[in-house]
Amino acid sequence: MFTIGDFARLGRVSVRMLRHYDAIGLLRPAAVDPHTGYRSYRAEQLHRLNRVIALKELGLTLGQVRAILDDTVEVAELRGMLRLRRSELEARLAADTARLAGVEARLRMIEREGRMTTQDVVLKELPPVRVAELTAVARSYETPDISAVIQPLYPELFRRLGEAGVAPCGPGLAWYEPAGEGEAVVVHAAVTVTADRAAARDFSVVDLPPVPAAATIVHHGSMDEVAGSIQALAAWIEANGWRADGYARELYLDYCAEDPEKGVTELQLPVVKAR
């Protein structure tokens, strides 16, 4: 048999952890000296220890691990527990991947700072436009939150337009507005149409009013990397004595769902002269 210290080293765990497993009945020592209280373990107990560690690293509680190893959990229930944990890990991986992509986009933006100047900004009037739209709520203005909401809206909008026999007559358009208190955002995914507003449909048809003055800039590439263009737009507005006056729009001049890097988007921000 092995002392608790030797067994801990063989199992690559701490002595403290083995003592805790003993206390909760998860992994009892093979023998305990009645006089000294020293614990001893057999080599075969490494099998149970390895299973404990593996199940714990899957995210199961120690109570669940004990139930599994002691055969008090039905196979179907165990399978359900592991499937749930797999789904949780996949969701976390997807979130971490999106977060990493966001960090990389920010780094690329920092590297390109200064390449797009305020000379790329154009001040112009925006005409009124009729659009068909779907809306949904994102948790915040953060790029992963917006992307997760707006990306499925457009395919659904075009599907509904097709079923209604309504043909788009211009580019896609998106804009965002606060959803009340907190950081939630109403996401508008729209496309230019000439449809009748009065008809009952499973999408909305709205008329966007004209904008007397809007600061605009054309962004080339993925919208995940739009921050640099927004910075140039903001710098121009501030330097020329304007202030934002309304919700920014994104006009998708060339929308490339399969290859976002080829996308061309005009950012439009209504402005008025600052006092």
Image (spheres, rainbow, N blue to C red):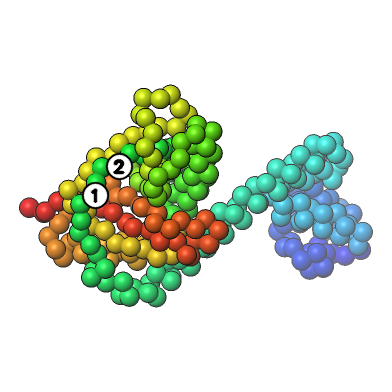
Label 1 Cα crowd, 10 Å radius (few <14 / some 14-19 / many 20+): some
- Which secondary structure, mark 1? strand
Measured in 3D between alpha carbons, the distance from the residue under mark 1 to the one under mark 2, in whole angstroms, is: 9 Å
Q: Which residue is mark 2?
A: 129
**Quadrant of res 66:** top right
In the image shown, does 172 or 261 lie closer to the viewer?
172
Which residue is painted at 30% across and 50% down in the image? 248
Q: Which residue is mark 1?
A: 126
Image spot of residue 50 (x, y percent)? 82, 58
In the image shown, does 29 or 43 lie closer to the viewer?
43
Image height check: is 112 above or below 244?
below
Image spot of residue 23 (x, y percent)? 75, 47
Residue 24 seen in the current view: no
Which residue is painted at 46% across and 56% down in the image? 255
Which residue is painted at 50% across and 41% down in the image? 158
Labels 1 & 2 near each other (Cβ < 8 A):
yes
Amino acid type at image mark 1: Leu
In the image shown, does 258 or 58 lie closer to the viewer?
258
**Quadrant of res 217:** bottom left
Residue 93 seen in the current view: yes
Is 193 displayed left or right of 55 in the figure?
left
Amino acid type at image mark 2: Val
Image spot of residue 82 (x, y percent)? 75, 45
